[in-house]
């Protein structure tokens, strides 16, 4: 599904001029579609978007601005600014009076929750879920596509949404060759759907760049599914590093099982081998920094793990290691270099640390 807002203006849209007006260098026009009685512009923000934006003119003074409800979090937050900017550029009027108040962060969260509920309902009775404005033409979501990432219909909304974003961002969703391949139901009868519910048995806290807390929750079905994937991986099935990191996480946190530091280390290292340069080495560093079950604190190994990560948080910890002398004597020059890098990347702890100087 998508969200569409209307703008009324007698002025004609020149998209190139609108791009220049926005002054957003990564905004890319994908294509223009002209049809009898309408013209459509489809575009995205390079490096940020996982779906397309759409502007439609009926050539009689009405513009529709649309965003896919499975768009990236940043694009959903950007959407009211886009609509407001277009209205000002066209010197037009919007049907919505207080756009920033109505399309606030709560609206973003509600939009995602409702869309994931709709996705779960659809995949409960149909094999394919199609986005309104996919970045990859004819891309769709299926249970098979989600399965290899440890996600299913009993997973939490943030977990499903997060992995759908990962699949779209890395162009991993299956795509039809043409619409004739779409699987269509043989009946038009309405079907009552019991949407699978998520029941958490454990959660993992993480910190965002700005210091806010978020939680990743796991159900019993999540744990069983991840352990099944772990067995398949050991038998030779290829898996993405982020999935192996999740397997390490449930061992590290003791979700659905006793805490097992040695197993967590194994899976974090495997995750790094399979391309996870963000989460796995950071989690491995934290494990060694704090200790885990039968694994004792080892600051030298923590430092080595953080050095493998591209995470701003890991860069902050490297600065801390140099300041506190985890391996040898304190080296404030190197510490400040890493604090400055982490602060430049937006990490709140590094920013606070630099303010103390």
Image: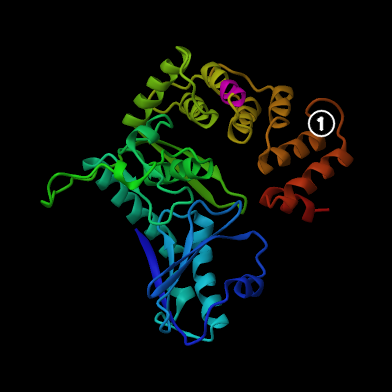
Q: Which SS does the magenta portion mostly show?
A: helix
Name above or below for residue 28 compared with residue 184.
below
Q: Residue at x 21, y 42 (%)?
A: 125
| Mark 1 Cα shell of 10 Å, populated few (<14), some (14-19), many (≥20) | some
Quadrant for residue 289, please give it.
top right
Label 1: which secondary element: loop
Display colour scheme: rainbow
Quadrant for residue 139, please give it.
top left
| Residue 196 seen in render | no
- What percent of the width, then of the height, locates residue 14? 57, 76
Q: Is residue 269 magenta?
A: yes
- What percent of the width, then of the height, locates residue 263? 52, 17
Which image quarter holds the N terminus? bottom left
- What percent of the width, then of the height, locates residue 81? 54, 71
Labels in figure, total: 1
Return the residue at label 1.
Answer: 325
Name above or below for residue 163 compared with residue 294.
below
Q: Residue at x 43, y 66 (%)?
A: 66
On the picture, is 150 further left or further right than 86? left
| Residue 66 seen in render | yes
Q: Residue at x 42, y 56 (%)?
A: 133
Of 187 and 260, nearer the camera is 187
- What percent of the width, then of the height, locates residue 255? 41, 28
Q: Which residues are magenta?
A: 268-273
């Amino acid at each position: 599904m998508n969200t569409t807002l209307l703008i009324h203006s007698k002025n004609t849209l020149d998209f190139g001029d609108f791009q220049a007006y926005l002054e957003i260098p990564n905004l890319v026009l994908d294509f223009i579609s002209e049809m009898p009685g309408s013209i459509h512009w489809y575009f995205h923000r390079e490096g940020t978007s996982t779906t397309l934006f759409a502007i439609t003119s009926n050539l009689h003074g009405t513009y529709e601005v649309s965003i896919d409800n499975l768009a990236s979090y940043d694009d959903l937050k950007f959407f009211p600014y886009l609509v407001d900017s277009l209205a000002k550029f066209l010197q037009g009027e919007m049907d919505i009076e207080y756009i920033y108040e109505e399309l606030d962060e709560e609206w973003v969260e509600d939009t995602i929750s409702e869309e994931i509920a709709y996705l779960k309902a659809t995949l409960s009775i149909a094999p394919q879920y199609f986005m309104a404005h996919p970045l990859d033409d004819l891309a769709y979501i299926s249970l098979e596509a989600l399965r290899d990432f440890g996600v299913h219909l009993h997973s939490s909304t943030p977990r499903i949404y997060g992995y759908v974003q990962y699949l779209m961002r890395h162009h991993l969703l299956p795509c039809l060759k043409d619409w004739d391949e779409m699987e269509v139901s043989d009946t038009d009868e309405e079907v009552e759907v019991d949407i699978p519910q998520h029941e958490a048995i454990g959660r993992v806290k993480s910190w965002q760049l700005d210091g806010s807390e978020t939680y990743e929750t796991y159900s019993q079905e999540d744990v069983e599914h991840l352990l099944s994937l772990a067995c398949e991986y050991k038998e030779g099935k290829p898996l993405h590093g982020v999935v192996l990191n999740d397997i390490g996480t449930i061992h590290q946190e003791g979700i659905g099982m006793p805490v097992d530091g040695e197993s967590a280390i194994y899976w974090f290292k495997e995750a790094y081998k399979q391309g996870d340069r963000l989460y796995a080495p950071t989690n491995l560093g934290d494990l060694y920094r704090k200790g885990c079950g039968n694994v004792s604190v080892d600051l030298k190994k923590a430092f080595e793990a953080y050095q493998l990560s591209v995470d701003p948080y890991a860069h902050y910890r490297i600065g801390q290691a140099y300041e506190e002398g985890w391996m040898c004597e304190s080296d404030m020059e190197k510490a400040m270099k890493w604090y400055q890098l982490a602060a430049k990347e937006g990490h709140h702890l590094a920013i606070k640390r630099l303010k103390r100087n």
